[in-house]
């Protein structure tokens, strides 16, 4: 029985295909939600990481199947590819097993507000102008995520809830990191204002936030490697963040980690 009833659900930065994806929390949410529209706001699959090494287990496969099941049962599912799954941008305009692939989306809330929905990498000058710099930063970030994974293995054995080392460190750093987030948010808000929108919905920077910047509402739905957050639109049109890692009904997957040596994105989405 669904415990989360909403009009729209926005998820981004799942990073399926990696060990860092918190597929257990994600699957728990998808099994408990009742929504009219599900929007996947980019970096659903981490194809960048999967070129080096693929991690794929039964829980991640179940996430994909649950999304497809929601589409089959009448939920409008829209997939907006990000920079880590940019290969999927080649399928923009098509529909695969009920999942519509779009470059970006105009979303109207129930109370009549108009939002631009995009992954957000276009607001990130580092990604647009220097892949080398981004790759070096990505390496350090992945090391932090690996440390966080080992730490949470210990915490789980001690009966403690999930906690993200990398997210905690981000709140402790000053200067460059906070300035980067500020500039990203400013770029997203400026683009929304120029486009005549009431707000913007994005992901990409793994920093969940819902904040009004003057007449523009900035919404970042976060990620599923650090924060396990989603953006929820209720039936009246109100937008808010949901921190699913604080939820008490996560079902821990019992399957072993069995990497798929021949993982293929298109075959996952098109198999019958």
Image: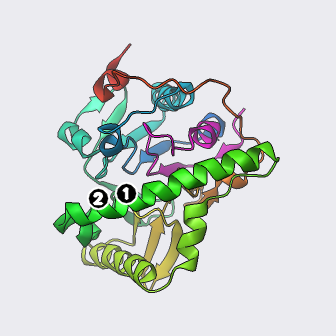
State left or right for residue 196 relative to residue 228. left
State left or right for residue 150 relative to residue 80. right
The magenta span reads 1-29
Q: Residue 180: give x, y in percent of width and height.
A: 38, 78
Is residue 12 in the magenta section?
A: yes
Q: Nearer the viewer, residue 15 or 242?
A: 15
Q: Nearer the viewer, residue 189 or 195?
A: 189
Q: Tell me the SS state at disc 1.
A: helix
Mark 2–mark 1 contact, CB under 8 Å?
yes
Q: CA distance from mark 2 to mark 1?
A: 6 Å
Disc 1 crowd rating (10 Å Cα; few below 14, some 14-19, many 20+) is: few
Question: Residue pushed farthest right?
Answer: 159
Q: Residue 256: give x, y in percent of width and height.
A: 60, 24
Residue under the image location 25 percent in, 39 percent down: 88
**Residue at image mark 2:** 135
Q: Is residue 48 visible?
A: yes
Q: Residue 94: give x, y in percent of width and height.
A: 23, 34
Q: Quadrant of residue 229?
A: bottom right
Where is 253 relative to 217, above or below? above
Quadrant, the C terminus: top left
Q: Is residue 223 visible?
A: no
Q: Tell me the SS state at disc 2.
A: helix
Quadrant, the N terminus: top right
Mark number, residue 196: none
**Residue at image mark 1:** 139
Disc 2 crowd rating (10 Å Cα; few below 14, some 14-19, many 20+) is: some
Where is 48 relative to 215, above or below? above
Q: Residue 267: give x, y in percent of width and height.
A: 31, 21
Residue under the image location 75 percent in, 45 percent down: 156
Q: Nearer the viewer, residue 13 or 141?
A: 141
State left or right for residue 218 relative to residue 192. right
């Amino acid at each position: 029985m669904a415990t989360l009833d909403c009009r729209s659900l926005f998820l981004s930065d799942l990073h399926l295909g990696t060990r860092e994806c918190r597929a257990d929390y994600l699957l728990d949410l998808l099994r408990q939600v009742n929504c009219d529209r599900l929007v996947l706001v980019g970096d659903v699959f981490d194809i960048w990481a999967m070129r080096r090494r693929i991690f794929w287990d039964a829980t991640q496969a179940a996430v994909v199947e649950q999304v497809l099941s929601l589409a089959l049962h009448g939920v409008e599912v829209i997939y907006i590819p990000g920079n880590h799954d940019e290969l999927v941008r080649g399928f923009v305009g098509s529909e695969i097993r009920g999942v519509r692939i779009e470059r970006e989306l105009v979303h109207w809330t129930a109370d009549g507000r108009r939002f631009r929905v995009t992954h957000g990498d276009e607001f990130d000058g580092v990604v647009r102008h220097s892949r080398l710099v981004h790759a070096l930063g990505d390496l350090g970030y992945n090391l932090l995520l690996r440390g966080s994974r080992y730490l949470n293995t210990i915490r789980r054995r001690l009966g403690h809830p999930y906690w993200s080392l990398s997210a905690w460190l981000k709140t402790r750093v000053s200067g460059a990191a906070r300035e980067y987030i500020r500039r990203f948010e400013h770029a997203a808000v400026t683009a929304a204002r120029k486009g005549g929108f009431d707000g913007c919905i994005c992901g990409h920077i793994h920093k969940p936030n819902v904040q009004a910047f003057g007449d523009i509402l900035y919404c970042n739905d976060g990620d599923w490697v650090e924060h396990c957050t989603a953006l929820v639109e209720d039936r009246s049109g109100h937008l808010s963040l949901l921190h699913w890692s604080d939820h008490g009904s996560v079902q821990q997957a019992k399957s072993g980690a069995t990497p798929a040596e021949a993982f293929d994105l298109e075959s996952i989405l098109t198999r019958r």
